[in-house]
Amino acid sequence: MKLSCLQDNLTKGLSIVGRAVPVRSTLPQASHIKLETDQGRLKLVATDLTMAVTCWIGAQIEEEGSITIPARLLTDFVASLPNEKIDLSVSERGHQLHITCARNEATMAGMDAEDFPPVPPVDDGLSINLGPAELSKAITQVQFAAATDDTRPVLTGIHTLAEEQTLTLAAADGFRLAVHKLALTEEVPEKVEVIVPVRALREVERLLSDQTDQVEMSINGGRTQVLFKMNSVEIVATLIQGTFPNYGQLIPSSFTSRAEIDMKQFLQETRIAAIFARDGAGIVKLQMEPSGEGQPGKLTISARAEEIGEHRGDMDVKMEGEEAKIAFNSRYLQDVLQVLEVDSVALETTSPSSPGVIRPIGDDSYVHVVMPMFVQW
Amino acid sequence: MARTIVHADLDAFYASVEQLDNPELRGRPVVVGGSAESRGVVAAASYESRAYGVRSAMPMSRALRLCPDAVRISPRFERYGEMSKQVMAIFRSVTPLVEPLSLDEAFLDVSGRAKFHGGRRPLAEFLRAEVKKRTGLILSVGLGTNKTVAKIASESGKPDGLIIVPAGREAEFLAPLPVRALWGIGPKSEAVLAEAGFARIGDLAASSSDRLGAILGSRGPEVYEMACGRDDRPVVTDSERKSVGAETTFPRDLPDGDELRNQLRRIAEEVGERLRRHGARAKTIALKLRYSNFNTITRQTTRGEPTDGTDEIHGEATVLLDNVVRSGDKFRLIGISCTNLEEERKEQLKLFD
């Protein structure tokens, strides 16, 4: 193998695939990055065996070939080099990568690329094209609701349902549920329902800002792998097997109180109250009062820190239904409010111990259900 | 399933402890309390002195007039506390569900425990025998399906009594008793009820919840239920007891002044801190004062909003103290106890399990 590329490109490529490199691995090859010439470009691959990231960067190939090099060493070294041309070559005899850049010269011991874990093919299944901006928004609006602990592995994934002309992403951690519906340009030939690890989707989302073309999402026939194909990056992830909770029934179909709230104000007031709620399990209390004669409705957000102080802030809202009280973990409120891209949201409640529903006004594609905190009022 | 509740009450507790500790006092009329000269009151009277008409809370001077041979003894609360602990330990050997009401009485929920003792009567006898064997004290026991019945049963059986009210016979047991035997019926309510023609608990049971509500107000329905022998209040153990308090006994009696006020502040801090640690807030704040003559009073106030703040507790206690203190008063003990607690239960509810 003999090639040259720009330090800048190689650094960027290594940092993209580097996110799949496991911190610890029983398989030594897995902590390596595979370098391989591929149709006039340099292909970089890393995997932790549940997710593989492949990235292609521009290179001048003189001799085809491949090698694997310890990820950390290669990444740190290349990142420290000046932004100039880098020459890479693998010696004929051993598994050694020779690197020269400006007046630096280095040799790194690698391994045979044949021993690198293969990236499974993702074929004979469903393939759909998604707009990068739409996909990014969908992932952003659901990913935070996925469970972080893996007592129930299915909840660490995003339930992904392709049906007719809609792709629905849903995440739930037992306390909240986020559902986003994406309109597809074409109807899918069959209903496909899988659970994608949230980590893979977060990686996809990180790359979408550079993406202008449509993203191709493919799920293999055996429903074991998902592939996201972007401009010069591909991510393949092993799907989570299991049954996701039937979340449709968790979304309340009615409410007794509904307030339309200015989003920015709601988020700001929640953040202010959260400062006081730090010590009290993050509890913020919401009170909604219907509009009176000539008076707008009011939403009051308050929080109390034992022996320290308390805070209350209120805002005018458009209120429908009865007055209501409900308490939430402030973090849950902030999580959802900071990912919505609308001017106002609706908060729907039924009782202090029934789920609260947050919907962006003027955007039917999203719904968020959050369980309240039981508190003594 | 019907519960089995025991009300256990030590007979003439303070006086009995004195008689146990000092054999010379046995068989003699003993009254425990402050001296007549210091306007003391009777904290406890032995059965020998009761025969002369001496009763608790009676001024000592009057008690000694009724029973000139009585031996007056200053109370030794620490010693009573020790004895009480031993007795409560015996109760807890039978069931963990023990609700102490004071040093000398407690409710025990012994539902399901009787079979280990061969029945309810053997269980009650076991309690009495154990207390007698280990402390020498006499325990009266009332046993029934709820607190009201058990308490009234033990009262009726005193001294050295054991009364068991079988399930289904609660109303029948209560019916012939005077209305003041019911919890919460004091002289005032008794007079009001008498005027309305109610003398016996049976009369109340034959009436109606609405009727008693009209006479007694909001407590009416509760009184009616109790009169009918129904009471579903649970036995609340010490650990979950709904009160947090602290008190201090002074090495020498204190008049009202900085020292007393500082002690009050310190106690308020201690109580506030304990409330906060338990995540509880109190609606009722009670001030306890023991005068130099051993007369002990409590005054309490109930707030609209529960609190766990030192300043609020201290403020309420100060108002209570200001209201009772008169110049020349000297105090042996001051304490604050907070009841009517609201546990700040906080819980993230789940969307699904």
Image (cartoon, rainbow, N blue to C red):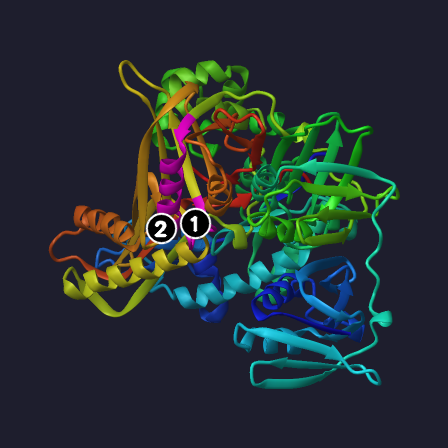
Within-10-Å neighbours for mark 2: few <14, some 14–19, many 20+: many
Instruction: Tell me the number on the disc at residue B280.
Output: 1
Q: Which residue is mark 2?
A: B308
Asked if residue B290 lies left or right of residue B10, the reply is: left
Residue A175 among magenta residues: no
Task: Give A2 or B316, whichever is nearer the viewer.
Answer: A2
Residues at discs 2 and 1 in contact (Cβ within 8 Å): yes
Residue displayed at 23% across by 61% down: B331
**Magenta residues, dominant SS class:** helix
Indicate the secondary structure of the residue bearing disc 2.
loop
Q: Height in image: B134 above or below B3?
A: below
Asked if residue B273 lies left or right of residue B226, the reply is: left
Q: CA distance from mark 2 to mark 1?
A: 7 Å
* Chain identity of mark 2: B
Q: For residue B232, what is the image quadrant?
A: top right
Q: For residue B68, what is the image quadrant?
A: bottom left
Q: Height in image: A290 above or below B248?
A: above
Which residue type carries mark 2? Answer: Asp
Which residue type carries mark 1? Answer: Ala
Within-10-Å neighbours for mark 1: few <14, some 14–19, many 20+: many
| Magenta residues, start to end | A260-283
Percent across and percent down for residue B305 are 33, 39
Percent across and percent down for residue A18 are 66, 66
Task: Give B137 or B61, whichever is nearer the viewer.
Answer: B137
Percent across and percent down for residue A226 are 77, 47
* Chain identity of mark 1: B
Q: Where the C terminus of chain A falls, by quadrant?
A: top left
State which tag comes first along the sequence, 2 or 1.
Answer: 1
Q: Where the N terminus of chain A falls, by quadrant?
A: bottom right
Instruction: Tell me the number on the disc at residue B292.
Output: none
